Amino acid sequence: MKVKIKQWNAVAQWRWDTGNKDAADDEEGDVCGICRVPFEGCCPSCRVPGDDCPLIWGECSHVFHMHCLLKWIGTAASKQQCPMDRRPWATAERRVDNAPPPTT
Amino acid sequence: MLKIWSMKKNEDAVAKKKPKTSAAQIRVQKDLTELDLPDTMKTHFPDPNDLLNFTLTITPDDGMYKGGSFVFSFAINTNYPHEPPKVKCTQTIYHPNVDLEGNVCLNILREDWKPVLNLNSVMVGLQYLFLEPNADDPLNKDAAQELIKNREHFLSNVKQSMRGYNIKGVQYQNVMG
């Protein structure tokens, strides 16, 4: 049987690499704890997800939408603590697991 | 990709046309759908279109306040979840952690609030106050003193106050549903 492709549509999917491999099993694992919107969505003050509404990683390993976390840290009530564990917030280097070593 | 850029250009125009649902409303909506309340707690929305203002009735089925029906008002402002909901008891009750104006002393409504908490955690916390009133850091000092000094007498004061009696010159409200 010969098949002639008349038309094709490319479909792509993306998601943030949160370092949480079990995110699919863990219902709470892939939403921002502050706004409760999935990481792949955007924070309530943005309209387009992606690089303009990035995630932020804490050294305590907790992840949030950057805008949500910065808004919280900006309030006096936050005492600059992580909203999950109340440890002093320290922004971590983004962890990219399984990434090839930098070539430069 | 090109489509995304043009979408972005239209963003502002769209934002102006549509009355925007606030971030607080979106978050409250999620909290409410996730509410998992025991039979002892019921929410009531006087205006079904206003999710930010409602009441919660707690009817403890155990502990010293069993048999009472306690009504709290919830007022959520647009900074939610960065600010906790404002919760007040709508009745005059005899409780070490609730003052006569209805202000509630619950850590997660004040210094220990954090935006990963939700309405369910607040409601469960409120119910806990009726099961385990605590005399540390009280709002009603007389009630707290009594709880420490003489638990039996405190209990009898609670029972009387719930029937609408006067204790030490304060007229309490009958909360026996």
Image (spheres, helix red, strand yellow):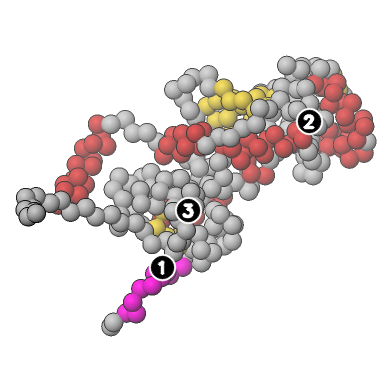
Which residue is denoted by mark 2 in the rendering? B62
Q: Is residue B34 above or below residue B174?
A: below
Question: The disc numbered 3 marks a residue on which chain?
Answer: A
The image quarter containing residue B25 is top left
The image quarter containing residue B118 is top right
Same chain for labels 1 and 3? Say yes or no: yes
The amino acid type found where label 2 is placed reads: Asp
Q: Is residue A27 above or below residue B27?
A: below
What span is in magenta? A92-102
For the point 36% across and 59% down, the residue is A16
The amino acid type found where label 3 is placed reads: Asp
- For the question of whether residue B158 can be seen, the reply is yes
Residue contact between numbered discs 3 and 2, judged by CB atoms under 8 Å: no
Residue contact between numbered discs 2 and 1, judged by CB atoms under 8 Å: no
Q: Which mark is residue A25?
A: 3
* Mark 3 or 2: the one toward you: 3
* Mark 2 or 1: the one toward you: 2
Residue B21 image point, x, y percent: 37, 33
Which residue is denoted by mark 1 in the rendering? A94
Same chain for labels 2 and 1? Say yes or no: no
A98 in magenta: yes
User: Rounded to the nearest whole Å, what is the CA distance between mark 3 and mark 2?
Assistant: 37 Å
